[in-house]
């Protein structure tokens, strides 16, 4: 093999490893899987507040999964302050996974849930 071909292959491998490392460590922004329905489809603040009040024990169970987890009424729509959802804030990947696992086996709150990394 020619020396230039070996150099090109080496550069490509180093670039691919660098990109993989950046993705793994979160240095490159990628689209979030934590999305919510469009604002016009979200329930009212009153409905979400009531759902959270009716499911206090579930909210506490979620918060007990990690010291950085907080369950609250979230207002994701800056143009419509009357639309809300349950917002669950977390800090680490392990907290996110624990939250997702619990939500999957539960009945939820009856309103949309949005996970937000702090």
Image (spheres, rainbow, N blue to C red):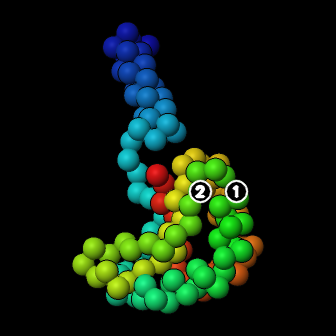
Identify which residue is drawn at 43% across, 85% down. 45
Tell me the residue that label 1 is attached to: 65
Quadrant including the N terminus: top left
Asked whether the beta carbons under mark 2 and mark 1 sit within 8 Å of each other, the answer is yes
Tell me the residue that label 2 is attached to: 69
**Quadrant of the rendered structure where residue 71 is?**
bottom right
Secondary structure, mark 2, is: loop
Q: Measured along the vertical axis of the image, is residue 13 above or below residue 27?
A: above
Q: Residue furthest top?
A: 3
Identify which residue is drawn at 45% across, 26% down. 13
Image location of residue 42, percent across then percent down: 42, 85
User: Is residue 20 among what the camera can see?
Assistant: no
Distance from disc 2 to disc 1, alpha carbons, whole Å, reads 7 Å
Identify which residue is drawn at 49% across, 37% down. 25
Q: Measured along the vertical axis of the image, is residue 28 above or below residue 39?
A: above
User: Is residue 60 among what the camera can see?
Assistant: yes
Secondary structure, mark 1, is: loop
Query: Callout 2: 10 Å neighbours few (<14), some, many (20+)?
Result: many
**Quadrant of the rendered structure where residue 53 is?**
bottom right
Image location of residue 51, percent across then percent down: 58, 85
Give the number of the disc on residue 46. Answer: none
Q: Nearer the viewer, residue 12 or 56?
A: 56
Image location of residue 4, percent across then percent down: 33, 14
69 relative to 21 in the view: left or right: right
């Amino acid at each position: 093999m020619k020396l230039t071909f070996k150099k090109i292959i080496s550069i490509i491998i180093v670039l691919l490893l660098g990109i993989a490392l950046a993705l793994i460590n979160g240095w490159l922004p990628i689209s979030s899987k934590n999305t919510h329905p469009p604002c016009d489809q979200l329930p009212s603040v009153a409905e979400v507040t009531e759902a959270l009040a009716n499911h206090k024990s579930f909210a506490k169970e979620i918060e007990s999964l990690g010291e950085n987890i907080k369950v609250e009424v979230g207002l994701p729509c800056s143009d419509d302050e009357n639309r809300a959802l349950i917002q669950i804030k977390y800090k680490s990947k392990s907290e996110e996974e624990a939250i997702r696992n619990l939500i999957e086996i539960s009945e939820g709150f009856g309103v949309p849930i949005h996970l937000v990394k702090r």
